[in-house]
Amino acid sequence: MATEDKLDPQASFRDGMRTLIAARFESVFEAIPAAIDGSDPEGVHDVRVASRRLRAAMDVATECFPKSWYGDLHKQAKRITDELGAVRDRDVLLEFLKTERQRISAAEATGVDRLITRITSERDEARTHMIRFLDGLDSRGIKRIVAKRFGDDDRDERPKS
């Protein structure tokens, strides 16, 4: 950090937020493979938690960065949370229905089984959409943009005060 940044609380805050946002994005990127794998519903949950933490940091830092430089990444952070919501909602509902299925009568179980089948089909469709979106983060260059704007490797991409 330059000497003048130490005397400028705005610059110090901006640098701190830049570091925090980079770490939060990295947490999202690290959690994505488990969500795509799909063998554990917690993978989707972990991405959503990481993306909500990212959004919270980005919400606090909106005044630190120019909208043209920051706005699209801020929107992408929100989209990550939103795009995984349909899968997560169905995961939670399926877990509840399967637990309840153990406690109900055989007559009621038939209806619950149909509901489980329908929700599972909806979840599969939502997962297909989610995977397409998550794979698209790479094709849209989001990781590269985050690294350039928030990483330590390229100070030319950082906004000036």
Image (cartoon, helix red, strand yellow):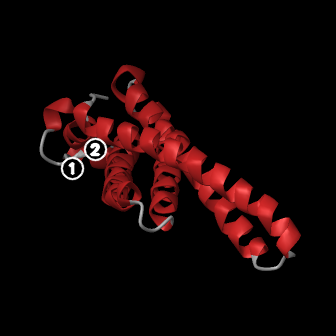
The residue most toward the top is 68
Residue 71 appears in which quarter of the rendering?
top left
* Residue ID at (34%, 41%): 11
Where 133 falls versus 1 (above or below)?
A: above
Where 37 falls versus 6 (above or below)?
A: below
* Residue ID at (50%, 48%): 124
Q: Is residue 120 left or right of residue 147?
A: right
Residue hosting label 1 = 1
The 10 Å Cα crowd at callout 1, few under 14, some 14 to 19, many 20 or more, is few
The answer to whether residue 14 shows anywhere in this view is: yes
Q: Is residue 68 left or right of residue 138?
A: right
The residue most toward the bottom is 103
* Residue ID at (29%, 49%): 6
Q: Secondary structure at mark 2?
A: helix
94 vs 115, nearest the viewer: 115
Residue 147 appears in which quarter of the rendering?
top left
Number of numbered labels in the structure image: 2
Residue hosting label 2 = 5
- Do residues under tags 1 and 2 come within 8 Å of each other at their CB atoms? yes
Where 136 falls versus 27 (above or below)?
A: above
* Residue ID at (60%, 59%): 91
Residue 33 appears at what percent x and percent y? 32, 58
Residue 20 appears at what percent x and percent y? 37, 54
Quadrant (top left, top right, bottom left, bottom right) of the C terminus: top left
Report the amino acid beneath label 1: Met
